[in-house]
Amino acid sequence: MAVATATQPGSKHNVQVARQAYYDKISKFHMAPLWEVLKDLVTPEPKTDCRPALWKFSDVKRLMLEAGDVISAEEAERRVLVLENPGETGNARITHSLFAGIQLILPGEIADVHQHVSSAIRFVLEGEGAYTAVEGEKTMMSHGDFIITANWAPHDHGNPGKQPVMWLDVLDMPTVNHFQASFASHFDEKMQKTNHADGDSFDRYASGVLPDGAPAHLNRSPVINYPYAKMRPILERLKKTGDIDKRHGARVRYANPINGGPVLPTMGAHLALLPKGFKGEPYRSTDGTIFAVAEGGGTTIIDGKPFEWGVNDVFVVPPWKRYFHNAAAESVLFSISDRPAQEALGIWREGN
Ligand code: 1HN
């Protein structure tokens, strides 16, 4: 009986050697064998480097205030600490598609006006007295306010108040850079001229009327600030009438009042109230999701591991990892993800 050895034609070893020689040859023509990598490219379930992670506000605040001693807002352009996903260290992202960071602006500081293709949202964590100016509207920032800065919208921030102000920034920058479509520009002046009063865009577009002649199609919301003071009572109404989703709690979706769609084409956000003692049912979806705690305290089990959270903590759930929330106290969770982008492309899925 013939025994295959390393020297026989047709042996496993010879096949490997012949294939490698072939791969080396085709590589000179900038070609490669799909069959060697197919299983890693077309996975039966989502594959991600993103890991579940949580940032305690007590750490974030202490370290962020130290950054105030190290660099001024002007020198930094934006004094932001990147929340780096531990599975994507060095890549300046919290999920594969989204950037998240914490920004600090100290009393007396301004952050100059600029614009870029990346859309941004801000969710205000702590402090009063700072403003952001977006597309001619200057809006004061308070805890829980959800502020959008759409693609190419000029924006600058300032703090004429007395307290340090911190907020969560989330940008679709990794998505824009995936398409290699980034542009940015600066203005000669440090602050933009603002002729729209605080709350102007909310009152104009989100009061059941629209300015006559407003566009019927707009792929981003014209509202700059969705104030927490206006959103919080709506959650209370949902709670009172028992409109509580078994997975998400009493939840609203931040909407574009022009068409009911998401606030931005690349990012969508929700605000959810979890009643005290809420024990959520498991949920998973293909959009890796960033949570910020507006109120309360509880635990979210992500992929079998508990993450305990309190006010202003930020945590992230990777794509398709199963999670459920337990609320020790009545809690309010803000969340944001790339779901609108995935839905537009027809690739978003959810499950339990
Ligand atoms: C940016 O422009 C801001 O305008 C914040 O406040 C964070 C992160 C990456 C790129 C641009 C801001 C940012 C950013």
Image (cartoon, rainbow, N blue to C red):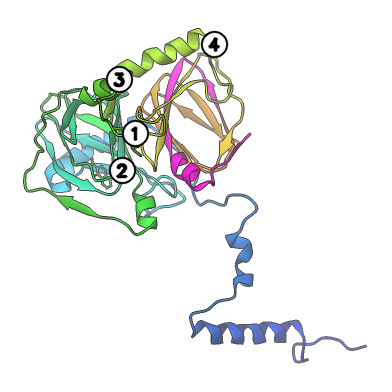
Instruction: Indicate which disc, 3 or 2, sits on the residue closer to the N terminus.
Output: 2
Amino acid bearing label 4: Gly
Instruction: Indicate which disc, 2 or 4, sits on the residue closer to the N terminus.
Output: 2
Report the label total. 4
Q: For the residue labelled by badge 4, is the local secondary structure a helix, a strand or a loop?
A: loop
Mark 2 to mark 1 CA distance (whole Å): 21 Å
The outermost residue toward the top is: 240
Query: Which label lies toward us, 2 or 1?
Result: 1
Amino acid bearing label 3: Val
Q: Which residue is mark 2?
A: 119
Q: Residues within 10 Å of mark 1 (few under 14, many from 20)?
A: few
Task: Find out whether the residues at labels 2 and 4 contact each other: C-beta distance under 8 Å.
Answer: no
Q: Which residue is mark 3?
A: 209
Instruction: Out of 312 and 256, give the one closest to the viewer.
Output: 256
Query: Which label lies toward us, 3 or 2?
Result: 3
The disc at residue 242 is 4
Please tell me in which quadrant of the rendered image residue 341 appears. Answer: top left
Disc 4 CB within 8 Å of nearest ligand 1 atom = no
Instruction: Out of 38 and 262, give the one closest to the viewer.
Output: 262
Mark 3 to mark 2 CA distance (whole Å): 26 Å
The outermost residue toward the right is: 1
Task: Find out whether the residues at labels 4 and 3 contact each other: C-beta distance under 8 Å.
Answer: no
Instruction: Indicate which disc, 1 or 3, sits on the residue closer to the N terminus.
Output: 3
Task: Find out whether the residues at labels 2 and 1 contact each other: C-beta distance under 8 Å.
Answer: no
Q: Is residue 8 above or below residue 160?
A: below
Query: Which label lies toward us, 1 or 4?
Result: 1
Quarter of the figure that contains the N terminus: bottom right
The outermost residue toward the left is: 189
Mark 1 to mark 3 CA distance (whole Å): 13 Å
Disc 2 CB within 8 Å of nearest ligand 1 atom = no
Q: Is residue 99 above or below residue 259?
A: below
Magenta region includes residue 344: yes
